[in-house]
Amino acid sequence: MSRPAHRATLPARHALSVHAPADVFAWRGAQAITAREFFIDVARVAAALPAGSHLLNLCTDRYRFTLFFVAAVMRGQVTLLPPGTNAKVIRSLHGFAPGARYVADEAHDGIGLPRFEPDPASSATLPLLPGSVSTAVMSSPCSG
């Protein structure tokens, strides 16, 4: 018997309704990133993301990984998180999401997808979070 899907709908609100603007959200080396700075970065990246439905996130830097993940969620884009970047995995991604772009800390040879890197000089204002955000995590049935 399957359970009906439950989707919570909340009113749109500022991203900072959970954190005070000056709260430290992340650290990049010795530099503290406040919640305000993070969500402004998210808005800047989300506004710059090209149209599309899938984003392959290959970032190993935790801040960049989170930044691109949240920006994609805000744009309604699916973030692909493959178990690796070997040729077989990348070929399957091309078949599954042919219009995908990828983000990474540095360029990867052999990916065969366009790389997205936002303009660091662009600006944004503090975003409103949508009233309803859906995320789902899917994994292969085996870890081998």
Image (cartoon, rainbow, N blue to C red):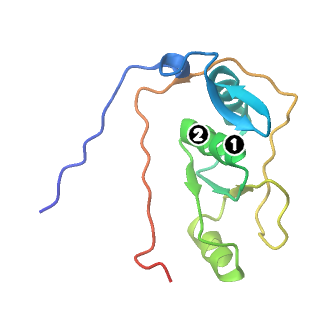
Between circles 1 and 2, the one closer to the viewer is: 1
Name which of mark 1 and mark 2 comes first in the sequence.
1
Which mark, residue 114? none
| Within-10-Å neighbours for mark 1: few <14, some 14–19, many 20+ | some
* Residue 9: % across, % down: 33, 29
> Residue visible at 35% across and 24% down?
10
User: Alpha-carbon distance for marks 1 and 2?
Assistant: 11 Å
> Residue visible at 62% across and 38% down?
71
The residue carrying mark 2 is: 70
* Residue 77: % across, % down: 56, 46
Amino acid on which the number 1 mark rests in the picture: Tyr
In the image, farthest residue toward the right: 121
**Quadrant position of the N terminus in the picture:** bottom left
| Within-10-Å neighbours for mark 2: few <14, some 14–19, many 20+ | some
Q: Quadrant of residue 125?
A: top right
Is residue 106 rendered to the left or right of residue 13?
A: right
Is residue 61 rendered to the left or right of residue 39?
A: right
Dot 1 lies on which element?
A: helix
* Residue 100: % across, % down: 66, 58
Depth order, front residue of 25/106: 25
> Residue visible at 85% across and 33% down?
120
Q: Is residue 130 above or below residue 134?
A: above
In the image, farthest residue toward the left: 1
In the image, farthest residue toward the front: 30
Is residue 7 rendered to the left or right of residue 76?
A: left
Amino acid on which the number 2 mark rests in the picture: Val
The residue carrying mark 1 is: 63
Is residue 92 rendered to the left or right of residue 27?
A: left
Are discs 1 and 2 less than 8 Å apart at CB?
A: no
Q: Is residue 127 above or below residue 97?
A: above
* Residue 76: % across, % down: 53, 41
> Residue visible at 66% across and 77% down?
91
